[in-house]
Image: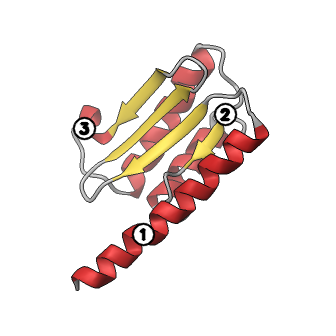
C-alpha cells in the first residue's frame, strides 16, 4: 500500500513541476490562485509572485467545516468576492498537482461564476 501512495505523490509532483516551469517560461505577471487539498481541509489563496505575498486567503478551517464539495463552492465564492473587491479580475489557476475534478473543480467553477477569469 505504501508504494502505491508513493507513486501517486511522485506523479502529483511531476504535474506541479510541469505547471511551474510553464509559468516561469511564459513570464506571467498575473497572480496565482493556489488551491491545496488535504484529507480534511481545503485551502485557497491568491499569491503575487513578483512580491511573494499572499493577497487573499480562504480555507475550510476558517469556515469550521470539513472539506466537501459544498464547502469547496463556498470557498470558491468567498475567494472570488475578496479578489474582485481588491481589484483582481484575472488569475492563473494552480491546483498544486491535484487532478481537476471534485472539490478542485467546484472551487474553480464557483470562482468563475463570481467573476474571476482564468
The reply to whether discs 2 and 1 touch (Cβ–Cβ < 8 Å) is no
Question: Along the line of sight, which residue is nearer the eye, 81 or 35?
Answer: 35
Q: Quadrant of the C terminus?
A: top right
Q: Mark 3: few, some, or many residues within 10 Å (few <14, many ≥20)?
A: few
Q: Give whichever of discs 2 and 1 has the lower sequence position.
A: 1
Callout 1 secondary element: helix
Location of residue 41 in the rendering, given as x and y in whole percent from the top left corner: 28, 49
- Sequence-earlier tag: 3 or 1: 1
Q: Residue furthest top?
A: 86
Query: Looking at the image, which residue is at 37% across and 47% down?
Result: 71
Asked if 50 appears above or below 17 in the picture, the reply is above
Labels 3, 1: front one: 1
Callout 2: few (<14), some (14-19), or many (20+) C-alpha neighbours within 10 Å?
Answer: many
The residue at the point 72 percent across, 26 percent down is: 29
Residue at label 3?
61
Question: In what element is the residue under mark 2?
Answer: loop
Give the image location of residue 60, x and y in percent. Answer: 30, 41
Amino acid at each position: 500500500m505504501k508504494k502505491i501512495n508513493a507513486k501517486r505523490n511522485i506523479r502529483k509532483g511531476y504535474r506541479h513541476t510541469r505547471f511551474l516551469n510553464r509559468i516561469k517560461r511564459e513570464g506571467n505577471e498575473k497572480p496565482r490562485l493556489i488551491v491545496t487539498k488535504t484529507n480534511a481541509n481545503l485551502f485557497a489563496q491568491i499569491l503575487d509572485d513578483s512580491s511573494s505575498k499572499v493577497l487573499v486567503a480562504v480555507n475550510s478551517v476558517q469556515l469550521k467545516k470539513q472539506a466537501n464539495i459544498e464547502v469547496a463552492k463556498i470557498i470558491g465564492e468567498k475567494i472570488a468576492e475578496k479578489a474582485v473587491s481588491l481589484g483582481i479580475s484575472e488569475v492563473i489557476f494552480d491546483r498544486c498537482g491535484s487532478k481537476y475534478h471534485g472539490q478542485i473543480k467546484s472551487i474553480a467553477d464557483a470562482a468563475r461564476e463570481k467573476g474571476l477569469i482564468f
